[in-house]
Amino acid sequence: MTDNEIDSVAPPPLAEAEAPATPRPEGGRKPPKRQFKRDKRDVHGWVVLDKPVGMTSTHAVSVIKRLFSAKRCGHAGTLDPLASGALPIAMGEATKTVPFVMDGRKLYRFTVRWGEERDTDDAEGRVTATSEARPSPEAIQAALPAYLGTIQQVPPRYSAIKIEGERAYDLARDGEVVELQARPVEIVRLELVEVPDADHAILEAECGKGTYVRSLARDIGRALGCYGHVSALRRTAVGPFAPESMILLEDLEALCHRAAAGEASLADALMPVETALDDIPAVAVNRADAARLSRGQAVLLRGRDAPNFHGTVAVTVAGQLLALADFERGEIVPKRVFNLAGVVGRARPPVKG
């Protein structure tokens, strides 16, 4: 039965004259029908969905949450409906590590359509400027170095940035003039991959948090004097998650169905919570110190083997993730303690090439 089916099987209907009157509560309304509610469970780990074009990030999260019957679920970095590719989705205690993924670098492959600038800076928007000029591959290549390193970038008017508490895209859709200030972003790599025809160029960018590929296409088009917008966009890597980490929705559905039939385990569909902490130093503690940390109490490490660095650390006990903590002068101060009871991800993350 589905979630919407009644929690009972009705007997064959009686003839109209024989059917007993349905008791009604005061007010004349029928009592509500009881329905199945799918039990939610504690599921902890990461799935990197290969999001298809046309699906919103919010919808993708709801699909995965329902598929795993997970109590908590969230994504680490929005992908527009037009875009496809890597959408890291955290479940359970993995949601506590989302900021570490969002702060990581992203890798995008995108197609720029020359000759048109649009108000959204992608193919979904309204054309605001046109040009008959088309750049040569040499001109495109020569323009790219200006966008490397830390640059000042004006985000698209249709973006999730807040202006006095309102999302920029909501203001733009209401017809208001949206003026966003330039802000610093980091672009580590920007390469021309292919020029399939005079109207299009395929580029690849590796960039830091807050970079808008749509703004890159817009700005490069203006610099080349031909205008441009993103006509296709695919994110292939996010932070610690390599391209090989991605899984198609239909493959994930098949694996979960096999798990429901007892032919597989949900844990095999999930990468461990600590996958997001790939670049965070780890500190191992004994069980006595672990008990103190789990209660929110600080622990002081002494001796020659005590680490001599400082900052955020991932604390482990017997090889299991215990907490995120601040580490300073041998003292561990817990900030986020993990409770990994339930289904815990154990799939080995692919090695980044």
Image (cartoon, helix red, strand yellow):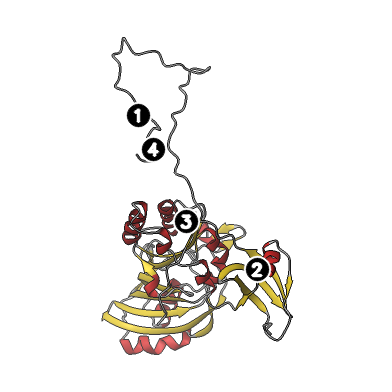
Q: Secondary structure at mark 2?
A: helix
Residue at which label 2 appears: 287
According to the picture, the residue beneath numbered tag 4 turns out to be: 4
Question: For the residues marked 4 and 1, what is the alpha-carbon distance in whole angstroms?
Answer: 13 Å
Q: Quadrant of the C terminus?
A: bottom left
Q: Position of residue 4 (x, y in %)?
A: 39, 38
Where in the figure is residue 275, as x and y percent of width and height? 50, 71
What is the three-letter code of the residue carrying label 1? Val
Whichever of labels 3 and 4 marks the residue nearer the N terminus, that label is: 4
Q: Quadrant of residue 245?
A: bottom left
As measured in the structure, the alpha-carbon distance from the residue carrying label 1 to the one carrying label 2 is 52 Å
- Element assignment for label 3: helix
Question: Which circle marks residue 74 in the picture?
Answer: none
Q: Are marks 4 and 1 in contact (CB under 8 Å)?
A: no
Image location (x, y in percent) of residue 311: 67, 78
Q: Residue 282 location in percent, x, y?
A: 59, 77
Q: Is residue 228 visible?
A: no
Point 62% across, 67% down: residue: 323
Q: Reply above or below: 216 against 163.
A: below
Nearer the camera: disc 4 or disc 1: 1
Question: As drawn, which residue projects farthest toward the top?
Answer: 17
Q: Earlier in the sequence, mark 4 or mark 1?
A: 4
